[in-house]
Amino acid sequence: MSDETLIKAARDAAKHSWSPYSDYAVGAALRFEDGAVITGTNIENASYGLALCAETVAVAKALGEGRRGGLVAVAVVGPSDKGDGAPITPCGRCRQVLNEIAQLGGTDPRVLCVGADEVREVTLSQLLPHAFGPAHLD
């Protein structure tokens, strides 16, 4: 699967966003070593602190399906007509949540941060250096 296809999956996921408070639809798509793609979208709540980010929803779906590691790539997209159109990156919580599933499989996935006119590619370890993970609890 190409990066463009993964980004399209994230865009398609964003169409299902429940974001009536921020009006900021986000989609995420996770690609695994076996080629599977799991998507998620942000889900807001009237009690703002209970909102779920797209990446967190996708990781929860993947873990709920029994996936333990194997994460090789992530695409994150937001609305191209908000802000300055710069690529969006996962928030701090999502970086940690992505790190959990990545460390379970010993991977350092590529993260495609998509903006209106640019895709910024970084590794998860670049977004979250010196990460805390499952190995710290042994």
Image (tube, grey):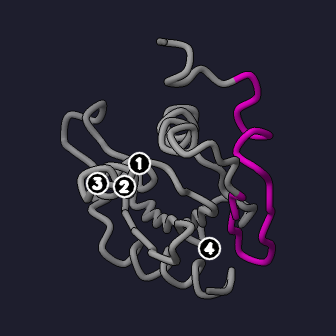
Label 2: which secondary element: loop
Q: Is residue 122 left or right of residue 4?
A: right
Res 84 → quadrant: bottom right
Instruction: Identify which amino acid the numbered label 2 is placed on.
Output: Arg
Label 1: which secondary element: loop
**Residue 6 numbered tag:** none
Instruction: Between residue 128 and residue 108, name the one nearer to us.
Output: 108
Instruction: Identify which amino acid the numbered label 1 is placed on.
Output: Arg
Within 10 Å of disc 1 (Cα), the crowding (few <14, some 14-19, many 20+) is: some
Instruction: Identify which amino acid the numbered label 3 is placed on.
Output: Gly
Q: Residue furthest left?
A: 46
The stretch of residues the image draws in magenta is 110-130
Q: Which residue is mark 4?
A: 80
Callout 1 touching callout 4 (CB < 8 Å): no
**Residue 66 numbered tag:** 3
Please report the residue visible at 59 percent of the width from the left and 20 percent of the height from the top.
132
The residues tagged by marks 2 and 4 sit, at their Cα atoms, a distance apart of 31 Å
Image coordinates for residue 125, horizontal then vertical, percent? 75, 39
**Residue 67 numbered tag:** 2
Res 5 → quadrant: bottom right
Please report the residue visible at 25 percent of the width from the left and 59 percent of the height from the top.
65
The residues tagged by marks 2 and 1 sit, at their Cα atoms, a distance apart of 4 Å
Please report the residue visible at 25 percent of the width from the left and 35 percent of the height from the top.
50
Q: Which residue is mark 1?
A: 68
Instruction: Identify which amino acid the numbered label 4 is placed on.
Output: Ser
